[in-house]
Image: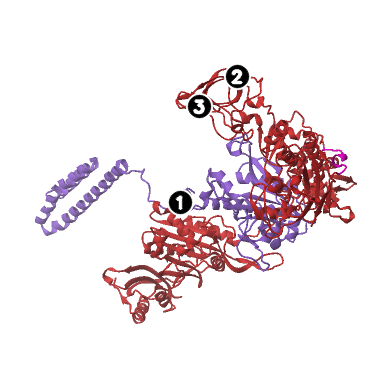
């Protein structure tokens, strides 16, 4: 929203010592965030008044002319195509370096071989209307060479307000409301709008019959009819103000409704009375639209309505979408003689729903959505009538004043909650942390329109109607008012006095960091962050069934429509991203996956239902040229991870883990006897479809299961050093390739209680061994609680060999 | 014979001592110990001696030969090592390469933040990324149809509850952890919750739909606005590792009252005004405020007995400032050219 300094000055005295920049800063520090302070004169930098000296035909172009222009110090040659210019006229000249309001930058150039040192401008090029029929001819006398903004007397300053910072303040969507704030923090006088009660009264010539179906949707409806309207352009001063804040002038009546909205914050609407006149007079009915009812709005869109939408009707058909946009059928045009001027209050929720449903947000709806004060209707209506009478002097109010609202018992008009709020001054001091003089606090609240009744220890504060719709209701709200106007930066920081407490430590966070350090350290992996989302296309290519994936109701991209159930798909994408630049890629991610089944975390305080099950996972991926290499490396990293926390790891064969797995090369990861993850080599046949040029192996581990395994193991005791020496023997043998390492290892470990450790140190396949054979070599450690003799160990080893021969048809290799 | 041997031994040792380069040493070795060498010749003559003489002279001769060989070898070592250290070792050659991995810059900065807050006595907590409407909005004093609930800002999950309503969202902030923490730990409470958050936003160099926040919460008896100022100033000094000045402005967040925006003096220009701070001399760092009594109540804490403050910090922005990163999309790009720089 843009706000004009000159407009402010109608309602508040701003001392000369306060520069516009200073005022902008003060607004930011006390009230709303100001995004920028712009002087209007900057808008026409390098655009000056020039006098046309002579006009000649362009030698190389029929439709162009060569114009000599005097801009004071020098004379310029300009090529121009407009036909409305004559020698002796004054016109705006954009010099080289000027940037027009529409963004065009002016440069010196040759046009069809003739030099052009600037440009004569049409009104639309200067943002002064839509006219592009010819150059803007300036009234004489004009001083040659002066800046166009000086000529146009543009001296206003425009503040850009960050709309997000006033979503909670319906009163600040106007010059009037902001002026009240300025008066409060500058401690100067606020000049409220006052009007004569007679303004809205008349000896009715016509009767306006109005009815509101549901006052919860339309708490107040006001309207009057005025005759003697002559539609014309607005006066210059009004057009200037509207344009200064970015509102395009249309005609006097439309401009006045817009002007009052920008000034007071109350949207108004004017209907052409002739277009809604019926045989028995003028009727207005405010009601819910009927399902399937349609109307054409001012933007020429046919809108399909339903019962959630509130409409203004003439008893037969909709005339306007209440609070959002008028209808084309009752629009003001050049022939309008009589108008019905509406100033109403609509329920913020109803407006929000309509806006969301129709995807139509307007200046009007933006204000109603914030919950406007119904009392503002009257102020704004009076202001509009005053302005219409001022601009079109012969107009008259010719109807009864419609003012409908629900009759509420107990004087609480329009259901506003004005309090009083009890403000305990001791509480205020404790919450602020400093003592501010009570008089100062009362002064601040009163300057903002609160009515304060003070007693010794507390204040009774009545909330002004414009803050009582939703904004202010509790003492904390009053604390904010006092503190921000006083100035947050005047409060001296003070450290709290608190009990020392040992913070609870979270093992998940401690171990997550350790795991990351291990993976990126000894593991030499790079950590990636991937999106929590996946897409259909990506999952299809991996043969993943996504019917049970949670879907996003409002996704923003076709490749991010669902929540991931595995880290693998996005990790596989990472390999594709990097494959052109690397032979071997090693990545990891620790992140969440999301399932549609309910988990353990409660949805709400009452414990009604549970959130979908969410699980943290560790994902590890290698991409490289050889299958065995990438699969082996992932296993090495899992081994490192387990070893780092003294955990035992086993890889168990599995035939079906994922549809995208190479069915021969996939396994479950068993840590301390529990399956907590899987390791999978991507089926090579899927590579082409995925655009992969590398072999890929991925492991995924359930993070919490892994942490639990660590925690269980972490309080293991110290083991006494061995008193007796160990004896080690190496054993290598050839077995059929089908026989699993896991089974052999288990057999050896369990063969005799003197065997304390079994460690694989070599695997060999191919070569002279022949097909379907592999050679395994183990270090075997024997130990007892006495010194073993060599003969004893040899004897055991021989028995072991015999056992392996019988059990696995192992052929012992000689060293 | 004995004298002859002693003489030649002395002669050879003298010469070895004088030798300066390895080639001369080789020449000397051939001259005396070669197949036709002088010492070799003498040793051959031993064969002609009587048995008795043989025993005495033989031992001597062999000892002498061994001693000379040892001396030559010692000299060789000296000469060759001086050769190496003197001219041929390129000390500038790198050692064998030991590869390293990389930790994501957001993890690194988040770790620093967690350490800082832990040192100030704050717990570090976690919460679900897929949240309920209740915890993400309702419990945080954001009622139905509040602008913050706009469908265009929030990713809703396409799954209705029993009442036929969409009540699951990708959390739009880390603030739901406030409520979950209050319920779990009660008051007094000091905690931070870093984590992944989501907004339904088209992405470009400065907008992301997936980003990282750190939520902070401190609740105790009589926590005041001036306490908030002091703690956040201290905390920001910790983050920037220098004493900072802060500037406090009004801001609006439904779950705090009053709501504040907190700026720090620009790290780049020191407050004079530069492009990074858009000429203002201040950088927007935190949203903060005193916890709204409705939020305390939703967390099961009595707002008449306890008060507190909360704050939220954008981690992406902090990382971007620290490393001068211009494009927010790089964080989730998985591009090793980016990740390997950290």
Q: Which chain has been coloured red in this picture?
A: A
The CA distance from mark 2 to mark 1 is 68 Å
Q: Nearer the viewer, residue B11 or B265?
A: B265
Q: Are marks 2 and 3 on the same chain?
A: yes
Q: Which residue is mark 3?
A: A64
Q: Earlier in the sequence, mark 2 or mark 3?
A: 3
Check if mark 3 and mark 1 are on a common chain: no
- Please state if B218 lies on the left or on the right of A796 as rendered: right
The residue labelled by disc 1 is B336
Q: Is residue A194 magenta?
A: yes
Could you tell me if residue A717 is visible in this image? Answer: no
* Chain that bears disc 2: A
Above or below, comparing residue A694 to residue A433 in the picture? below
Drawing shade for chain B? purple
Q: Residue at x 59, y 58 (%)?
A: A554
The secondary structure type at the circle numbered 3 is loop
Tell me if residue B88 is in the magenta stretch.
no
Of circles 3 and 1, the one toward us is 3
């Amino acid at each position: 929203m843009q706000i004009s300094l000159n407009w402010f000055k109608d309602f508040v005295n701003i001392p000369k010592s306060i520069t516009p920049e200073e005022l902008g800063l003060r607004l930011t520090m006390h009230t709303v965030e100001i995004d920028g302070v712009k002087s209007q004169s900057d808008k026409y930098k390098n655009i000056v008044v020039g006098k046309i000296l002579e006009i000649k035909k362009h030698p190389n172009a029929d439709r162009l002319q060569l114009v000599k222009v005097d801009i004071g110090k020098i004379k310029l040659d300009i090529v121009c195509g407009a036909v409305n210019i004559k020698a002796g006229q004054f016109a705006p000249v954009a010099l080289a370096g000027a940037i027009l309001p529409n963004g065009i930058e002016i440069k010196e150039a040759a046009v069809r071989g003739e030099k052009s040192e600037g440009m004569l401008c049409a009104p639309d090029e200067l943002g002064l209307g839509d006219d592009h029929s010819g150059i803007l001819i300036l009234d004489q006398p004009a001083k040659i060479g002066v800046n166009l903004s000086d000529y146009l007397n543009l001296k206003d300053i425009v503040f850009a307000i960050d709309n997000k910072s006033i979503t909670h303040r319906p009163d600040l969507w106007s010059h009037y409301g902001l002026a009240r704030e300025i008066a409060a923090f500058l401690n100067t006088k606020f000049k409220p709008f006052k009007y004569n009660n007679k303004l809205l009264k008349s000896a009715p010539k016509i009767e306006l019959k109005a009815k509101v179906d549901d006052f919860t949707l339309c708490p107040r409806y006001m309207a009057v009819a005025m005759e003697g309207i002559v539609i014309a352009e607005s006066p210059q001063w009004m057009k200037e103000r509207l344009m200064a804040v970015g509102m395009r002038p249309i005609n006097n009546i439309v401009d006045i409704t817009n002007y009052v909205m920008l000034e007071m914050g109350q949207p108004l609407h004017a209907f052409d009375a002739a277009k809604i006149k019926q045989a028995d007079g003028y009727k207005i009915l405010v009601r819910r639209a009927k399902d399937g009812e349609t109307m054409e709005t001012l933007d020429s869109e046919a809108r399909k309505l339903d019962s959630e939408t509130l409409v203004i009707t003439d008893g037969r058909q909709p005339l306007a979408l209440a609070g959002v946009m008028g209808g084309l059928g009752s629009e003001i045009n050049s022939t309008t003689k009589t108008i019905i001027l509406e100033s109403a209050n609509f329920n913020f929720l109803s407006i929000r729903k309509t806006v969301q449903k129709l995807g139509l947000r307007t200046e009007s709806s933006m204000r109603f959505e914030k919950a406007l004060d119904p009392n503002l209707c009257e102020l704004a209506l009076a202001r509009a009538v005053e302005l219409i009478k001022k601009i079109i002097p012969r107009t008259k109010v010719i109807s009864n004043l419609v003012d409908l609202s629900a009759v509420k018992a107990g004087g609480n008009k329009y259901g506003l909650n004005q309090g009083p709020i009890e403000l305990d001054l001791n509480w205020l001091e404790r919450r602020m942390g400093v003592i501010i003089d009570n008089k100062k606090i009362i002064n601040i609240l009163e300057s903002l329109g609160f009515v304060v009744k003070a007693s010794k220890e507390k204040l009774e504060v009545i909330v002004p109607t414009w803050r009582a719709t939703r904004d202010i209701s509790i003492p904390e709200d009053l604390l904010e008012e006092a503190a921000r106007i006083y100035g947050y930066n005047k409060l001296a920081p003070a450290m709290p006095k608190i009990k020392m407490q040992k913070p609870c430590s979270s093992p998940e966070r401690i171990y997550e960091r350790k795991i990351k350090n291990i993976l990126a350290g000894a593991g030499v992996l790079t950590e990636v962050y991937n999106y929590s989302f996946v897409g259909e296309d990506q999952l299809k290519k991996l043969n993943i069934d996504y019917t049970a994936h949670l879907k996003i109701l409002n996704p923003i991209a076709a490749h991010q429509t669902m929540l991931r159930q595995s880290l693998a798909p996005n990790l596989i994408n990472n390999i594709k991203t990097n494959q052109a630049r690397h032979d071997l890629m090693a990545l990891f991610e620790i992140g969440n996956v999301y399932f549609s089944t309910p988990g353990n975390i409660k949805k709400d305080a009452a414990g009604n239902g549970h959130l979908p099950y969410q699980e943290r996972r560790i994902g590890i991926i290698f991409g490289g040229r050889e299958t065995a290499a990438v699969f082996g490396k992932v296993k090495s990293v899992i081994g490192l991870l387990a070893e780092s926390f003294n955990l035992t790891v086993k890889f168990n064969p599995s035939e079906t883990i994922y549809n995208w797995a190479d069915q021969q090369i996939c396994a479950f990861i068993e840590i301390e006897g529990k399956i907590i993850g899987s390791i999978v080599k991507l089926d090579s046949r899927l590579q082409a479809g995925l655009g992969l040029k590398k072999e890929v192996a991925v492991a995924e581990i359930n993070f919490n299961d892994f942490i639990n395994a660590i925690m269980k193991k972490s309080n293991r005791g110290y083991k006494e050093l061995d008193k007796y020496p160990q004896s080690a023997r190496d054993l290598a043998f050839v077995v059929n390739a089908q026989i699993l390492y896991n089974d052999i290892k288990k057999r050896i470990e369990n063969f005799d209680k003197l065997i304390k450790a079994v460690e694989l140190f070599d695997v060999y396949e191919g070569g002279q061994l022949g097909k379907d054979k592999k050679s395994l070599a183990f270090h075997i450690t024997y130990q007892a609680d006495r010194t073993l003799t060599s003969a004893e160990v040899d004897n055991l080893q021989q028995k072991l060999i015999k056992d392996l021969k019988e059990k696995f048809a192992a052929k012992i290799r000689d060293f | 014979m004995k004298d002859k041997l002693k003489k030649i031994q002395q002669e050879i040792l003298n010469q070895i001592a004088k030798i300066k380069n390895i080639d001369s040493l080789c020449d000397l070795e051939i001259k005396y110990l070669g197949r036709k060498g002088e010492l070799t010749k003498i040793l051959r003559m031993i064969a002609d001696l009587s048995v008795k003489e043989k025993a005495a002279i033989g031992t001597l001769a062999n000892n002498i030969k061994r001693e000379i060989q040892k001396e030559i070898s010692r000299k060789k070592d000296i000469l060759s090592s001086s050769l190496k250290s003197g001219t041929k070792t390129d000390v500038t050659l790198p050692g064998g390469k030991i590869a390293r991995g990389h930790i994501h810059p957001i993890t690194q900065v988040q770790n620093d933040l967690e350490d800082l807050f832990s040192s100030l006595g704050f717990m570090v907590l976690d919460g679900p990324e897929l949240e309920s409407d209740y915890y993400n909005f309702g419990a945080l004093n954001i009622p139905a149809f509040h602008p913050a609930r706009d469908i265009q800002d929030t990713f809703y999950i396409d799954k209705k509850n029993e009442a036929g309503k969409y009540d699951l969202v990708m959390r739009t902030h880390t603030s739901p952890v406030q409520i979950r923490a209050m319920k779990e730990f009660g008051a007094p409470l000091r905690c931070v919750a870093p984590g992944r958050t989501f907004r339904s936003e088209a992405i470009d160099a400065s907008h992301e739909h997936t980003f990282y926040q750190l939520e902070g919460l401190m609740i105790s008896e009589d926590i005041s606005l001036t306490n908030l100022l002091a703690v956040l100033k201290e905390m920001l000094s910790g983050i920037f590792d220098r004493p900072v000045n802060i500037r406090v402005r009004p801001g609006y967040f439904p779950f705090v009252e009053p709501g504040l925006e907190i700026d720090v003096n620009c790290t780049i220009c020191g407050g004079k005004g530069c492009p990074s701070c858009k000429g203002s001399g201040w950088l927007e760092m935190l949203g903060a405020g005193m916890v709204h009594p409705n939020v305390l109540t939703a967390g099961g804490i009595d707002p008449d007995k306890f008060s507190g403050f909360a704050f939220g910090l954008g981690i992406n922005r902090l990382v971007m400032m620290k490393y001068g990163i211009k494009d927010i999309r790089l964080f989730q790009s998985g591009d090793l050219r980016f990740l390997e720089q950290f």
